Amino acid sequence: MYLKDCIDTGWVSTAGKYVEKFEHMIANFTKARHVVATSSGTAALHAIFSALNIGCDDEVIVPSFTFVGTANAVTYTGATPHFVDIERISLGLDAKKLRKHLKSITTRENAELINCKTGKRIAAIVCVHAFGHPSDLDALSDLSNEFRIPLIEDAAEALGSYYNHKHTGTFGRASILSFNGNKTITTGGGGAILTNDTTLADKLRYLTSTAKEKHQWEFIHQEIGFNYRLPNINAALGCAQMEKLPDFLIQKRKLAKAYKEAFSSIDGVNIFSEPRWAKSNYWLNFLVLETSDVSFRDKSLAALNNAGYGARPAWRPMHLLPMFKTAYRSDLSVTEDMYARIINVPSSSQLSERLPK
Amino acid sequence: MYLKDCIDTGWVSTAGKYVEKFEHMIANFTKARHVVATSSGTAALHAIFSALNIGCDDEVIVPSFTFVGTANAVTYTGATPHFVDIERISLGLDAKKLRKHLKSITTRENAELINCKTGKRIAAIVCVHAFGHPSDLDALSDLSNEFRIPLIEDAAEALGSYYNHKHTGTFGRASILSFNGNKTITTGGGGAILTNDTTLADKLRYLTSTAKEKHQWEFIHQEIGFNYRLPNINAALGCAQMEKLPDFLIQKRKLAKAYKEAFSSIDGVNIFSEPRWAKSNYWLNFLVLETSDVSFRDKSLAALNNAGYGARPAWRPMHLLPMFKTAYRSDLSVTEDMYARIINVPSSSQLSERLPK
C-alpha cells in the first residue's frame, strides 16, 4: 500500500515522505534520538567514519570475526582496520582482552591514542553484534571512555536485539543497521545510522546527500560527500516491513526455541543461546561444534547442503583474507577457534510456520 | 506490475530476476555489450576507477563543468581530479584545448603519462555529456588513443542521446548512466555501468557485489569490494520505466522545440540546441544569456523563481568549490564564462502535455 502510494505520487527517489516516516519508525522502535536512512549498512559505516574525520593516518579497531563490509568501510576512508579478538559468550569484542592489548601497544600523544607498533592513531572501536547477539556494551562503553576513543556499533544484524532492555545501536557514539535482503526487515537494499548526537546527525545527513548546501537554487558543496541516501521507494517498503517487525521477532524466537529443543539431546554440538545480558533477535541461528577440527565442520556442511539445508560456515575471519594480511592484529585465537566450530542454519522468520503447533 | 510481482515473490533485494532483465533492457537499448546495474551513478564511476586500479598516485582528467559526483568519485579512490575546460558547442570537453594542455604539461615515463607539474600519473579522461548533450566523442576517442589513457563517459544524463547515430556511453572503455529521481528514467536511486570489455564487466560485477568469490558456502573475498548492486525492487521499477523511455524521449524533444520557438524572438537570450553530431535526449533545457554578467543571471533566476518557475543556474564549477581548490587545472575560461550565462529551465517530459496541441 505504501509502495503503491509511492509510485502513484511519482515520489520514488530521494525526496518524498517515506524516508522521513521510515526514519521516525526506526527512531520510535529503537529509542535512538536521530536516524539517517542510507543506501546500505556499509555506506552508513563509511559515512560515520568520514563524519568523525577518520582518514589515512588512522587505525580503527574492528573484530576479525565480522562481515567484510565492516572492515571494507574502514579502508574507504584511507584508514586501516586493526583486528582484535572476540569472546565466546557473545561472539562480540572481548573487552578485557582488548584493554590488555591496548595497554600493551599504545601510548597517548597529546589527546590521541597512538599504536606504538605502527605509529598510527587509533581513532575508534567498532563492535559488531554478530548474528544479532549483543556484544557486552557496558564493558565496551567503559573501555571507550577509559581510552577516550568513540565506540561505534555495527548493529547491521541486530534490529530487535536488546542489551539489558536497551536497544542495541543506542550505546555508541553512532551505530548502523542494515536492511539488506537477508536481514530481519528489508528495504531491498539499505541501511540506517543511529545517533543521539544532534550535531553528528546533521553532519551525517549532509554528507550522505552529496554535502549539498541549502540554497534557493545554487549547487554548492563545501566538502566531499556521498550519494548514500535511501530512495523513497525503498523507504516505503521499509515502512511496511517495520509494521511487521514485532511479529517477525516473535517468529524468530519461536524458531530459536525449536532449534534449541531439537539439538538438546544431540552429542557433539550445541545451539547458541543469547548471552545473559541480552534479548536477541536470533537473526541467524548457529550450531557450535564441540570439536574445532575444521574438516569435521566442512563434512557437516557438505552433508547438510546435500540434504537440501542451506547451512553455511561463519564468515572467513578478516585477518585471513588476502587484502587484510598486512593489517595490524592482536592475538585472534578465539576468532579462529570459533570460526572452525560454527555452522549457521536457516533462520527465516517464515520457517517457524512449519513448526508443529 | 513488475513491482507487484517483485513484492509478491519476496525477491526485493540483490538477488532476483529484475536486475538481470533491467540490465538486458539497457543493453538492448544502448547496444552496449555489458551492463552492470549499480546503486547510483557515482557508485558506478567509483567502481570503474577501482577496476582500472586508479589510486593515490593518480590524477583523472575531469571537466570542471559537471555535477559534483564526477569529481567526488575520483577522490574515493585516493586519486585527484585534474580539471580541464569545455567547448561552447556541446558543454563537453574541448578535445583540441585538452591536447594542447596535455602536450605542454606531460611526459611519458615507461608506459605512463605523467603530469610534470605534480609528478602524478594521468590515469584516465572522463568526459561528461552535460545536460544530456553528447561531447565530441570522435575527437575524444582520438585523444584517448593518442595519449594511451582510457576514455570514460559520464553519461549520467544521456540515456537516449546519440553521437552520430551511436548511443552515448558506448565509445569509452566504460561508461555510466544514472537513474536518480531527476533523470529521464528513474529507479528511485540507481545507476549502471556500460562496457564492451568482457573482462572488465566481470571484474565490475565482482567489485560491486563485495568482491565475494563464487563458492558453495564459504564467504571469501580476495580484495576490497563495494556494496553497490542495485536492489531488485529498484530494477523492477527501472524495467517499467524502460518501456516508457521512447515516449519520454518524444515528449522531451517536443518540449525542447516549444522552448526554442518561445525564445526565438527574445533578445539577449538563446535556447541551447544539440550539437551538429548529436541527437540529444534534451534531458535538461537551458538558456544561454548573451551577457556574461553573473548579476544579470541571478536577477533573472530570482524573477523566474518568484514567478513560480523552478529555474536553476548550472552547477558551480568544481574548481570553485573549497574541497577542490588545490586540484590541478588547465585554463578554465569557457567553463567560467558559460557558468555565468546558463539558466536551466524545467524540462520534465510531463510538461509537454501542457503544450498547445
Image: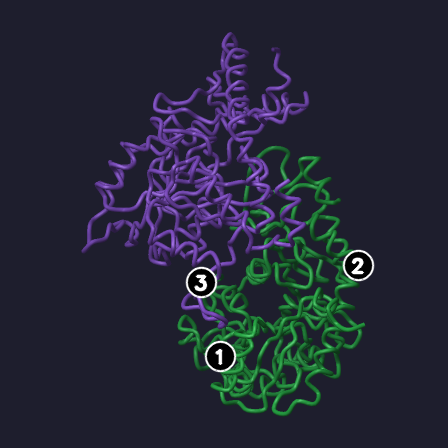
Chain colours: A green, B purple
Residue highlighted by disc 3: B211
User: Closer to the camera: disc 1 or disc 3?
Assistant: 3
The subunit carrying tag 3 is: B
Q: Amino acid at mark 2?
A: Asn
Q: Position of residue A82 (x, y in %)?
A: 50, 76
Secondary element type, mark 3: loop
The subunit letter for the residue under badge 1 reads A
Q: Which mark is drawn over residue A28?
A: 2
x, y percentage for residue A120?
47, 74
Residue displayed at 33% across by 30% down: B136
Mark 1–mark 2 Cα distance, whole angstroms, equals 39 Å
Mark 1: few, some, or many residues within 10 Å (few <14, many ≥20)? many
Proximity of marks 1 and 2: CB atoms separated by less than 8 Å: no
- Indicate the chain on which mark 2 is placed: A
Question: Could you say which is closer to the camera, residue A7 or residue B264?
Answer: A7
Front residue of B50/A260: it is A260
Q: Is residue A17 above or below residue B266?
A: below
